[in-house]
Image (tube, rainbow, N blue to C red):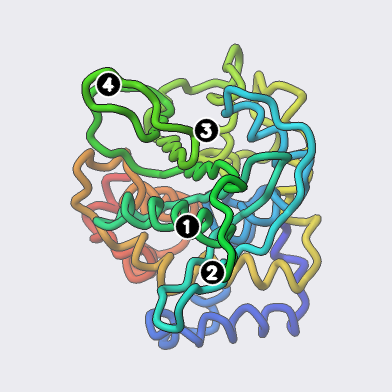
Amino acid sequence: MDTRKMTAAQLQQFEAILDEFEKYRDLTDDEKQQVIRAVMSGTFMDLRSDFAFKHIMQDTEILKMLLNDILPEPVDKIKPQPNEIDRLFAGDKDAKMDVVCESGDRKFIVEIQQKRRSDFKNRMYYYGAAMSQSQIKSGSPNYSTLLPVYVICFMDFRFQHQADQLIYRYALRDEDSGELYGNQLNIYFCELPRLRKRSMGGMNPLEGWLYLFRNLHKFAEAPEGMDKRFVPVLASARMNSLPTKEQIQYFRSMISEDEKKILIESGYEYGLEDGAEQKAIEIARQMLAEGLSVELIARVTGLSEDEIGRL
């Protein structure tokens, strides 16, 4: 997106969003415009942001392609569903997901997550259980009609596992024999940092998705070696294809309180290659390329001036 062509009114809209957050409120107008350029000047959105992820997945053909590239059994038709499940009791915790859909005899929850949380595994289990519970009506419950639920999460961090792989599939099994209890609840973790390939040439479909989720916002055009099947994803992710209202929504998602925490939290088990600090480093590099001052970059990203100097 060419931020140099923004009108004064458009810039004022973006600056007003920055003023909603204490971290940015005391910046000068020039500094605010520099932050706006750092976030909005790319060709493609950062697909790890909630807004961008939901935006591309609202295309049912893209969503169907993603599910077919991950699941063992094919998905034919996609029916979008509300992303918030009704509570069974007044005191129940709300369950609001990124993307929810149904296909034939299965229900799917698809999530993107940047920030590592200590309760993350429990939250994904809760989402799946809430989706199962929502299928049962009070009065005359019929448990035989329960559809299997799949919770699929793309994560910009890693957990400790017994093996190093791109996708981890969890289901209920007997501890001794490994016999499957059933397919009522399935949880998939796709951990973006585990993909170590640097070029899309020769990637399988899952690798291609992981690469685009983590890296697309860095490119000015389609990455070298990209399979043409991903062309619709890039078309949906183009910044300049967004109406002004949606540009504002994307910008707010990138500088919201949750996102700012992602920028400044560190100490992840696997170091700089995982979520929070890596995200801060990427933004710092973008701001350096724009010629912004080290002092301003430190204030926005939470990195120290020494850390920025080493970039």
Kindly report the distance in space between the C-alpha atoms of the residues bearing marks 3 and 4: 18 Å
Q: Secondary structure at mark 1?
A: helix
Closer to us: 276 or 115: 115
Q: Nearer the viewer, mark 3 or mark 1?
A: 3
Q: Secondary structure at mark 2?
A: helix
| Pointer 3 residue | 210
Kindly report the distance in space between the C-alpha atoms of the residues bearing marks 2 and 3: 30 Å
| Pointer 1 residue | 287
Disc nearer the start of the sequence (3/1): 3
Query: Residue extending furthest front?
Result: 140
User: Whole-percent x and y of residue 10?
Assistant: 73, 79
Kindly report the distance in space between the C-alpha atoms of the residues bearing marks 2 and 1: 8 Å
Disc nearer the start of the sequence (1/4): 4
Q: Quadrant of residue 81?
A: bottom right
| Pointer 4 residue | 163
Q: Nearer the viewer, mark 4 or mark 2?
A: 4
Q: Nearer the viewer, mark 3 or mark 4?
A: 4
Kindly report the distance in space between the C-alpha atoms of the residues bearing marks 3 and 1: 25 Å
Is mark 2 in CB contact (under 8 Å) with mark 1? yes
| Pointer 2 residue | 34
Which label was assigned to residue 61?
none
Mark 1 neighbour class, 10 Å CA radius: few under 14, some 14 to 19, many 20 or more: many
